[in-house]
Image (cartoon, rainbow, N blue to C red):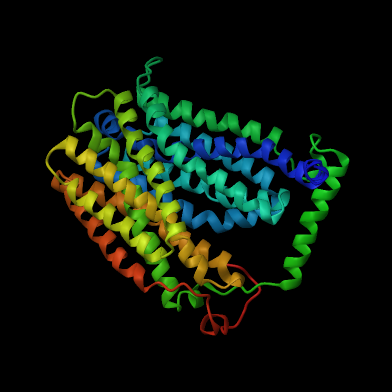
């Protein structure tokens, strides 16, 4: 009883609990807004084609250009975040991405669409690293993994919410604006409002948090400072990107994650178009149907996580998920729109589960000294799938009148990745990588 009471009143645990209560809900809402502003164009493809003449190829290219801007400016954004601090930089990111997202309401042709999608990627670059950096300043190491897991849950929640929210907003009319324009204005405006909340609620330093007692501030600062000193004493190995890419295993990881992201973003941007082919659906109904595959995927991700923890052969679980994705994609090429939608739901079980099951493999292989940099590299290359998938689908839709060829291509890529994953090794990087000259600058 005494021990339990001591634990309950421990100043460090009390401080950590308060930090989580104050910042995690805000970050979760920010992530949901971030995701919706990124993918909401999937619901206005047909509207922009009718009102602006933006064809399928232009839509696909514009969808993908977001990821080019994001990839090019993520490193500069991270450098500036280190200079100005996570609180100021996250507020800047929220404000600029909200403005660009709202400005999407006023695109008038293909070129303006391309420019704003690219700028949205530029504005959003650095958001996820900024949140992680904020956690490192406010939470001890043992608590950061839990906080990041809660934060990433926002991705799954946003996938479900984006359809009903965007679909509902498309029904708004007035002031001479179309529903799709109101959708961009309201969703972008919400992010701008969040910008104000992030500035007020987030604090730059632990000592500025009035909701922590003086004792809690001191012990939390001391704990984080001690961990930082230990990391600096141990040092770290940071290898140039080209030397990391000489390791065949790292190249394999990049390919596997790229193949997974190809499928995820193809479904994200083109699923509403597939749903509309069922006919007779309102925008809100399309949004509600759009939520179904992601709800199913959330349950599947949990089940796969439980099974893979019980029977540990990570490569086999990833391969199984990718084969499920491939089967669903093949089946979705059916001429029947309803059957195609059901097949996409089945495919979502595979590609979303594969995305979560993949990361333990490179984490088990990598030496701790290079893990952070290599994981960032894998993530950056993998996310380029967000450019190639929608751009290719748009081209096929424009020139063939069908995206079946793209679905076949994704299915083949999933099967190749399912076979290739068995080449991945679960061991740490050895001297073949770490024997390379170590440099002082990170990736």
Q: Is residue 315 visible?
A: yes
Q: Closest to the observer: 404 or 400?
A: 404
Q: Image check: 334 left or right of 193? A: left
In this rendering, is residue 205 above or below 362? above
Q: Along the line of sight, which residue is nearer the eye, 56 or 304?
A: 304
Could you tell me residue 320's position as x and y percent? 31, 58
Please identify the residue farthest to the right as the structure is shown: 214
**Residue 58 in view in this figure:** no
Quadrant in the picture for the N terminus: top right
Q: Is residue 9 above or below residue 188?
A: below
- Tell me what residue is drawn at x 77 percent, y 41 percent: 8
Residue under the point 34% across and 28% down: 288
Give the image location of residue 110, x and y in percent.
32, 41
Percent from the top left, x then y, of residue 91?
Answer: 63, 40
Q: Image quadrant of residue 168?
A: top left
Examine the image and state in which quarter residue 164 appears. Answer: top left
């Amino acid at each position: 009883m005494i021990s339990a009471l001591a634990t309950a009143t421990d100043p460090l645990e009390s401080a950590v609990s308060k930090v989580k209560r104050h910042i995690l809900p805000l970050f979760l809402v920010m992530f949901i807004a971030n995701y919706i502003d990124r993918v909401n164009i999937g619901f206005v493809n047909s509207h922009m084609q009718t009102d602006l003449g933006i064809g399928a190829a232009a839509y696909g290219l514009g969808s993908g250009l977001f990821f080019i801007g994001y990839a090019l400016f993520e490193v500069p954004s991270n450098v500036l975040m280190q200079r100005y601090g996570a609180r100021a930089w996250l507020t800047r990111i929220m404000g600029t991405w909200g403005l660009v997202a709202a400005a999407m309401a006023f695109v008038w042709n293909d070129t303006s669409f391309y420019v704003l999608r690219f700028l949205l990627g530029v504005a959003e670059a650095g958001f996820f690293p900024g949140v992680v950096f904020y956690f490192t300043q406010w939470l001890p190491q043992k608590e950061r993994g839990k906080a990041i897991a809660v934060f990433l849950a926002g991705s799954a929640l946003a996938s479900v919410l984006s359809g009903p929210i965007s679909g509902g907003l498309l029904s708004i009319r007035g002031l001479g604006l179309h529903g799709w324009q109101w959708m961009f204005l309201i969703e972008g405006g919400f992010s701008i409002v969040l910008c104000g909340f992030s500035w007020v609620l987030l604090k730059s330093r632990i000592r500025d948090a009035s909701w922590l007692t003086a004792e809690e501030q001191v012990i939390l600062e001391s704990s984080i400072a001690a961990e930082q000193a230990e990391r600096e004493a141990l040092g770290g190995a940071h290898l140039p990107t080209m030397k990391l890419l000489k390791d065949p295993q790292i190249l394999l990881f990049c390919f596997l994650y790229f193949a997974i992201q190809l499928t995820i973003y193809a479904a994200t941007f083109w699923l509403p178009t597939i749903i509309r082919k069922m006919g007779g659906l309102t925008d809100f109904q399309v949004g509600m149907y759009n939520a179904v595959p992601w709800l199913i995927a959330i349950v599947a991700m949990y089940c796969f996580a439980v099974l893979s923890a019980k029977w540990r052969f990570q490569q086999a679980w990833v391969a199984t998920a990718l084969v499920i994705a491939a089967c669903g994609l093949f089946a979705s090429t059916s001429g029947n729109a309803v059957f195609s939608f059901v097949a996409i739901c089945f495919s979502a079980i595979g590609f979303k589960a594969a995305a979560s099951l993949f990361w333990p493999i490179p984490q088990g292989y990598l030496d701790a000294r290079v893990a952070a940099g290599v994981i960032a590299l894998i993530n950056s290359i993998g996310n380029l799938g967000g450019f190639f998938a929608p751009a290719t689908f748009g081209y096929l839709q424009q020139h063939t009148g069908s995206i079946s060829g793209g679905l076949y291509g994704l299915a083949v890529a999933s099967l190749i990745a399912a076979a290739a994953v068995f080449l991945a090794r679960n061991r740490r990087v050895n001297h073949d990588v770490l024997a390379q000259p170590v440099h002082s600058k990170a990736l």
